[in-house]
Image (cartoon, rainbow, N blue to C red):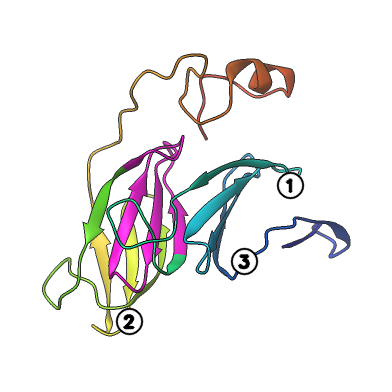
């Protein structure tokens, strides 16, 4: 992944490897990159340092066969499209598997080759449903994280690191 500033000047490269199929950036500059070959989403800091990875290759719950689009909700919950399994894997901000959305089919809320995901201003998850020829919309209650020792906002970054780098350890965004 190559990073450019607002004027278009090259700033740095983030060595991600794999087959990149989806990307999103959070307000702090954290970069979430999905890798369809490696079956994971890798999270990098704004400076390009590896922070954590969500998922592994496979077809069991929590695993990804063909990671595609990725979206991150305001509370840090991560949604990863698995195009081959026709579902979304849902991970906590610390990359713990929480469950799946969708599943193969043509009915409401079912997916057939989902490709990408995005979250709108009201917190709804939008998923492109390629073979069904429509956009699926998921609405759900906010995620309430469990206690994370040493990480008040459960975003996967220790409080000491956030304070040292000028971030609010109580704000996961």
In the structure shown, which secondary structural element does the residue marked by tag 3 occupy?
Answer: loop
Q: Position of residue 65 (x, y in %)?
A: 39, 67
Q: Is residue 120 visible?
A: no
Which quarter shows the N terminus?
bottom right
Mark found first going from the N terminus, 3 or 1? 3
Q: Quadrant of residue 141?
A: top left
Mark 2 vs mark 3, foreground winner is: 3
Q: Residue at x 59, y 43 (%)?
A: 27
Q: Position of residue 173 (x, y in %)?
A: 52, 35
Give the mark, 2 or 3, whose residue is nearer the N terminus: 3
Residue receiving disc 2: 130
Whether 75 is among the magenta residues is yes
Point out the frontmost of discs 2 and 1: 1
> Does the rendering let one see residue 93?
yes
The alpha-carbon separation of the residues under discs 2 and 1 comes to: 32 Å
Task: Determine the residue positioned at 46% across, 34% down.
Answer: 94
Q: Does label 2 or label 1 sit earlier along the sequence? A: 1
Task: State the image quarter where residue 33 is shown.
Answer: bottom right
Q: Position of residue 59 (x, y in %)?
A: 31, 63
Secondary structure under tag 1 reads: loop
Query: Residue 92: percent from the left, percent from the top?
Result: 39, 38
Residue 54 colored in magenta in the image: no
The residue carrying mark 3 is 18
Crowd class of label 1 (few under 14; some 14 to 19; many from 20; radius 10 Å)? some
Up-down relation of residue 55 to residue 171 (above or below): below
**Residue 115 versus residue 84: which sits nearer the camera?**
84
Segment colored magenta: 69-97
């Amino acid at each position: 992944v190559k990073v450019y500033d607002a004027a278009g000047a090259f700033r740095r490269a983030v060595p991600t490897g794999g087959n990149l199929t989806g990307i999103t950036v959070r307000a702090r500059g954290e970069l979430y990159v999905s890798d369809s070959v490696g079956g994971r989403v890798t999270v990098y800091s704004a400076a390009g340092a590896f922070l954590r990875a969500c998922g592994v290759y496979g077809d069991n719950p929590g695993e990804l066969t063909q990671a595609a689009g990725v979206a991150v909700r305001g509370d840090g919950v991560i949604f990863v499209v698995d195009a081959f399994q026709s579902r979304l894997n849902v991970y906590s901000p610390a990359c713990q598997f929480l469950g799946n959305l969708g599943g193969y089919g043509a009915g409401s809320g079912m997916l057939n080759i989902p490709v990408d995901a995005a979250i709108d201003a009201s917190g709804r998850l939008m998923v492109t449903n390629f073979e069904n020829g429509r956009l699926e919309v998921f609405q759900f209650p906010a995620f309430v994280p469990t206690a994370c020792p040493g990480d008040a906002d459960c975003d996967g970054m220790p409080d000491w690191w956030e304070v040292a780098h000028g971030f609010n350890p109580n704000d996961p965004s």
